Image: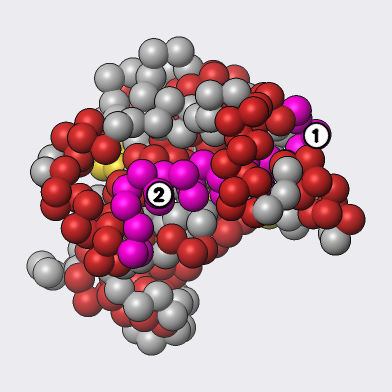
Amino acid sequence: MGPERREPDGMTQPRLSVGFLLTRRFTLCAFANFVDVLRLAADEGDRSRPILCRWSILSATMEPVRSSCGLAVQPDARLGDPTRFDYIVVVGGLIDEMDRLDAASVAFLRHAAGAGVPLVGLCTGAFVLHEAGLMQGYRCCVSWFHRNDFLERFDGLEPVADRIFVVDRDRLTCSGGVSAAHLAAYLVDKHVGRAPARKSLSIMIIDEVLSPDRPQPSVTDDLYTVDPLVRRALGLMRETMAAPLPVTLMADRLGVSRRRLERHFQKTLGLTPHEAARKVRLGQAKQLLASTERSVTDIAAETGFCDASHLIRVFRAEEATTPEAWRRQAVASC
């Protein structure tokens, strides 16, 4: 890297400066993972001095912002001029309790976009950026868990739910959780250096630096694999759960032959793609049975079964019981 720049007060000017906007009921994990990568990259060892990286939590009102887990975070700077930052990061949170940003914050984001300051959405921060009209024409990453919520809110927009984060010009979005650390490491690598990025993740006990195209993890424990192709296929199965793709079309979407896809599934999971897709759909059906009061008919439609009878037949063959009986047992054991 080149020589350090100096600010008027003699302090080293940071190579990476980030402003955070926290939404009401934001996800603390995504915020903490992102900011801790900056903290660890900003100084030698674990001393936490904001030398190479700096960050501020911005607010129009300076009122504390409560996270989804109940902890409140106090902003430390007013909105001001967004061009003093290299990136503005919006941290989203709970879908059902996420309010629109206040007018001043929306105006701040629009000012930043107009001035060419890149905007970052963590977790459901992508929803907030879309609500503010700042994602038109951009690809956008969301968690597979929130994909249907996104489709319901934004007609005609197809989110990316099979990657941990997406970089599309001056918009960067991630699925949340640990992917926020990997997105932060990507920015540290770009502006500060590869060694600080790797050091940050290492101290956080994150084994490797993941690229944006790494697939999101599967929800089904018995379908865990490190094979990138199979993980991408499992992500695609989750995305298209309500209308499952034929194996040939799935292979086309993944850019491989059907035979190659089948070999990878057989080698890593001992299943055909069709069998794995059925497990994915059954896994989601179980989650909905255990966590909601929705009817078996509704759950069958959402998870790609022809009707309730079809789901009951497949469920009985797999679990030796009916969905409703399984639900009663699951609720009783909680």
As for residue 285 lying within the magenta part, the answer is: yes
Classify mark 2: residues with Cα within 10 Å, few (<14), some (14-19) or many (20+): few
User: Which amino acid is tagged 1?
Assistant: Glu
Which one is in front in this view, the residue at disc 1 or the one at disc 2?
2
Write down the residue under mark 2. Answer: 275
Identify the magenta region.
Answer: 269-295
Q: Residue drawn at (16%, 35%), measured in percent from left and top?
A: 252
In the displayed structure, 75 sits above or below 137; it is below
Quadrant for the C terminus, please: bottom right
Q: How is the image coloured?
A: secondary structure
| SS label for mark 2 | helix
Quarter occupied by residue 25: top right
Q: Position of residue 311 (x, y in %)?
A: 61, 34
Quadrant for the N terminus, please: bottom left
User: Of label 1 and label 2, which has the lower sequence position?
Assistant: 2
User: Which amino acid is tagged 2?
Assistant: Glu
Q: Main secondary structure of the magenta part?
A: helix
Number of disc labels: 2
Q: Position of residue 271 (x, y in %)?
A: 35, 58
Write down the residue under mark 1. Answer: 293
Distance from Cα at disc 1 to Cα at disc 2: 27 Å
Tell which residue pokes out farthest to the top in this image: 155
Q: Residue drawn at (29%, 26%), measured in percent from left and top?
A: 138
| SS label for mark 1 | loop
Q: Are marks 1 and 2 in contact (CB under 8 Å)?
A: no
Quarter occupied by residue 43: bottom left
Q: Residue drawn at (35%, 78%), measured in percent from left and top?
A: 207
